[in-house]
Amino acid sequence: MSMPADELRTAAEKIRRLAAAVSAPDERDQTFHADGCDITQGRSRWMYDVATAQTPELAAFIAAMGPGVGAALADWLDSEADHGNGIDPAALTLARRLAATPAP
């Protein structure tokens, strides 16, 4: 059985790996944008297509949860892993949900 801190670090690593797959040079600085059902990434003239969602609401959700948010979540999970027995239950819930989600 894995230790909670290991679960958090594994989830943080998974988030970072998925964020790195986005072809932006620094995922923290490359925000996602939703325009109708289209999701783009980047700034001004350097925008490129990321995905097309089925609804504008789903596109807005995906844009809100872009790589910058993923990086912040990964940092939080690593920080919580360092707390030992004082791990926030929400962090462990997030880690376990990510573990149940298959990676591409």
Image (cartoon, rainbow, N blue to C red):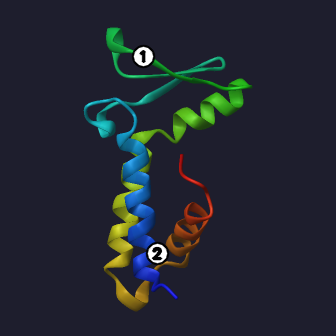
Give left or right: position of 54 versus 47.
right
Given the current orientation, which residue lies at the most extreme right position? 55
Element carrying mark 2: helix
Residue at horizontal 39%, vertical 38%?
A: 21
Query: Residue 57 vs residue 81: left or right?
Result: right
Dot 1: element: strand
Spatial separation of the CA atoms under disc 2 and disc 1? 34 Å
Q: Which amino acid does label 1 sit on?
A: Tyr
Q: Which one is in front, 12 or 102?
A: 102
Looking at the rendered structure, which numbered label has been put on residue 91?
A: none
Viewer-proximal residue among 52 and 76: 52
Residue 77 percent location from the top left of the image: 40, 67
Query: Disc 2 designates what residue?
Result: 7
| Residue annotated with mark 1 | 48
Q: Residue at 34% of width from left, 12% of height from top?
A: 44
Q: Earlier in the sequence, mark 2 or mark 1?
A: 2
**Amino acid type at mark 2:** Glu
**Within the image, what quadrant is residue 3 found in?**
bottom left
Dot 2: few (<14), some (14–19), or many (≥20) neighbours within 10 Å? many
Image coordinates for residue 4, horizontal then vertical, percent: 47, 82
Residue 11 x/y as whole percent:
45, 64
Q: As displayed, is residue 99 above or below residue 14? A: below
